[in-house]
Image (cartoon, helix red, strand yellow):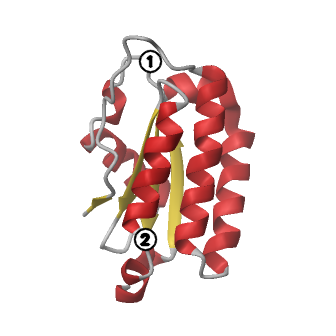
Amino acid sequence: MKSFFDRIDHDRIVAAIAAAEKQSSGEIRVHLHHRPVADPQESGRKAFEKLGMTNTRRRNAVLIFVAPRSRNFAILGDSGIHEQCGDDFWKKSAEALSAHFRDGKFTDGLVETIGELGRVLAAHFPPEAEARDELPNEIDEG
C-alpha cells in the first residue's frame, strides 16, 4: 500500500488532468482509496457522488477510482459522457490501465488513461468560451 502511494507522481498526474481538461468542457478526477473495497464500481459510484461529480453542467465528469489495498479500480463516467461512449469504451480504458498497473507503471498508466479520456471528452464536449474548471484537478485521497 505505502509503495503504491510512494510510486505515484502526483504532479505529473495533476498536470495530465489540467492538460486533458483544456481540450474540453469535461472534468476528470483521480481518487485513491485507502481502504480495501469489495466492489470498486460501487465504491467508485459513492466517491463520484461524494466528490460532487454529478453536479457538472454537462454531466461529463469522469472518475478514476483506485483502491490499491484491494488491487482494483474502476473508471466511471457521468451520464452525459457515458451516453456518448458506451460500455466498450470504459472496458477498453480499464484494460489499458490494468496492463500498466500489472507492470507496476502506476503513474504512466494514469497519465495515459487521463490523456485518452481527455481526447474522448474533447471529441464529444469541446471547450466552451464560458467554461470554467468545475472540479479540482488534485488527486483526492480517502
> What's the CA distance linking mark 1 and mark 2?
30 Å
Secondary-structure class at tag 1: loop
Please state if 51 lies on the left or on the right of 88 as rendered: left
Res 3 quadrant in image = bottom left
Contact, mark 1 vs mark 2 (Cβ under 8 Å) = no
Front residue of 62 and 87 = 62
Q: Amino acid at mark 2?
A: Asp
Q: Residue at x 44, y 23 (%)?
A: 59
Q: Which residue is mark 2?
A: 9
Q: Is residue 77 visible?
A: no
The one nearer the camera, 72 or 116, is 116
Q: Secondary structure at mark 2?
A: loop
| Whether residue 16 is situated above or below residue 95 in the rendered picture | above
Res. 142 in view: yes
**Split into 4 quadrants, where in the image is the C terminus?**
bottom left
Q: Residue at x 27, y 35 (%)?
A: 52
The mark total stands at: 2
Q: Horizontal and vertical percent for residue 85? A: 68, 31
Q: Residue furthest top?
A: 129
78 with respect to 133 (left or right)? right
Q: Which residue is mark 1?
A: 58
User: Label 1 amino acid?
Assistant: Arg
Q: Residue at x 38, y 66 (%)?
A: 10
Give percent across and percent down for residue 139: 33, 57
- Residue 76 circle label: none
Of circles 1 and 2, which is in front?
A: 2
- Residue 1 found in image quarter: bottom left
- Using residue 118 as the reference point, say whether residue 60 is left or right of it: left
